[in-house]
Image (spheres, helix red, strand yellow):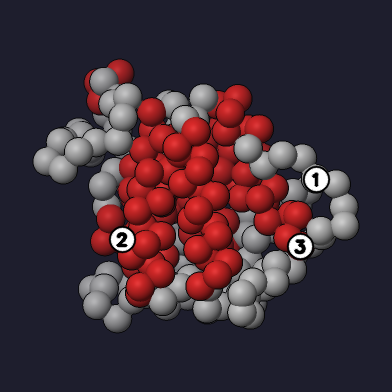
Amino acid sequence: MLLQLIRIPNIKMSSNYSHHWNEDMTQRTHEPMHAPETSIEHLATAEALIVSTLRLWVAPHARPHETHPNWKTGLHVAGVAPWGIHAFDTLLWIAVAAGQRELDVRCEHCPSLGRDEAWMLQMVNHVQFELQPEAFGILGGWMPDAATRAAMHHLTLFGHALNNAGMIVELPAGGARLLPAARAARPTRPRGRGERVTLH
């Protein structure tokens, strides 16, 4: 089941999807690394938390006359800082206000992964590992460049907040991963410019 989210002016959630990278991106792809329609049960804790939170955020907009769980609860329980939760909220409001196409976000009970839910996981992974150009390219498929630049700030804060809470988003084969030593030394605040993290 897909949710209908009416945005300002015309975005809604549906199964229709056509992803386009920003024209200045050299790397192009049309499929997220987490395959759409993957069973939610196969997601690790961090990935499942993000998908669940995204769906719960969307639900009141799609079905405003129903009662829904608080979308912030899972993030609070996971230890995500308030500034990270606020960043996630702001990111999605930018997507609602400036979005330029329909997004595939499923209802909270759907057993399979939506395509844009998979893209969200990939964007968070990219900002956690400081792959901002790649994240920008994906986000640029959701909204115009000016909005993307604003949204990137909040996406990056959200990724750092998850990182600080120990919620590292992994991708299937080819995704960047922290070495065990780097996991142990995970920063307790968003990394500043020039700070390094070990990747492989």
Q: Which residue is more in the foreground, 92 or 107?
A: 92
Mark 1 or mark 2: which comes first in sequence?
1
Distance (Cα) linking label 1 and label 2: 33 Å
Secondary structure of residue under mark 2: helix
Q: Going by the image, does 103 lie left or right of 119?
A: right
Which residue is found at the position 50% from the left and 63% from the top?
94
**For numbered disc 1, what is the local secondary structure?**
loop
Looking at the rendered structure, the kind of residue marked 3 is: Ala
Residue that badge 2 annotates: 134
Residue of label 3: 62
Residue position for label 1: 68
Asked whether residue 148 appears in the rendered view, the answer is yes
The residue type indicated by label 1 comes to His
Type of the residue with mark 2: Glu
Q: How crowded is mark 3: few (under 14 residues within 10 Å), some or many (20 or more)?
A: some
Q: Is residue 92 above or below residue 159?
A: below
